[in-house]
Amino acid sequence: MKKAVIALGSNVGDTLANLKEAVSLLEENGCRVLKTSRLYQTEPWGYADQDDFLNGAALIETDLAPFALLDVTQGIERTMGRKKLFLNGPRNIDLDILIYEDETVRSDRLTIPHPRLGERLFVLRPLMDIVPDMTVPGRGTVAELFAAYRGDERVEETDLVLMEP
């Protein structure tokens, strides 16, 4: 079994319900969810004229290889009715593979670790909740990336959770 970290985000519809459904669907599709982060209300990134997001992350364990895991996450997005209208636009669900063990993948379909992981506080903050000591291949630990972050995104902790600890 391999460990991976999935980022989860939603800003359309019942965002909490969307994220909970995505976690459930991960469990139904070959992923054992070990831990989830707190949820954070975050400003949109890349396209500002939309509602705030609810963001979190999940540490999973799986036998799925990276591309099979990508097929699962994209399948969940399709099942949940995600529409990709334009880059960084509003979406009911967004699942990104951030880290997959100590592996590095570079292809047109998938890049692991996620190429902008260290540039986005809405990703780093949830990662600090669940895997601060995890090494991001070629970049150091999550805690080191968090300490080095110099942006000014608005990321507000909520009292919402995906799973009870």
Image (cartoon, rainbow, N blue to C red):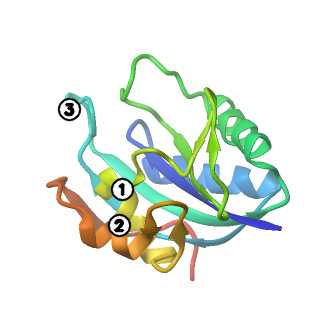
Residue 118: mark: 1
Left or right, 80 with respect to 19, comes to: right
Q: Which of marks 2 and 1 is nearer the N terminus?
A: 1
State whether residue 128 is above or below residue 56.
below
Q: Mark 3 points at which residue?
A: 48
Residue 72 screen position, x and y as percent: 74, 41
Around disc 3, counting alpha carbons within 10 Å, would you say few (fewer than 14), some (14 to 19), or many (20 or more)? few
Calculate the distance from the C-alpha at mark 2 to the C-alpha at mark 3.
Answer: 25 Å
Check if mark 2's residue and mark 1's residue have beta carbons within 8 Å: yes
Q: Earlier in the sequence, mark 2 or mark 3?
A: 3
Q: Mark 2 points at which residue?
A: 145
Residue closest to the far front: 138
Q: Under tag 2, what secondary structure? A: helix
Query: Which image quadrant: the C terminus?
Result: bottom right
Q: Under tag 3, what secondary structure? A: loop
Residue 13 screen position, x and y as percent: 43, 38
Left or right, 107 with respect to 122, comes to: right
Q: Which of marks 3 and 1 is nearer the N terminus?
A: 3
Calculate the distance from the C-alpha at mark 2 to the C-alpha at mark 1.
Answer: 6 Å
State whether residue 45 is above or below residue 26.
above
Residue 109 screen position, x and y as percent: 63, 29
Q: Can residue 83 be seen in this view?
A: yes
Q: Under tag 1, what secondary structure? A: helix
Q: Which residue is drawn at 32% across and 52% down?
A: 120
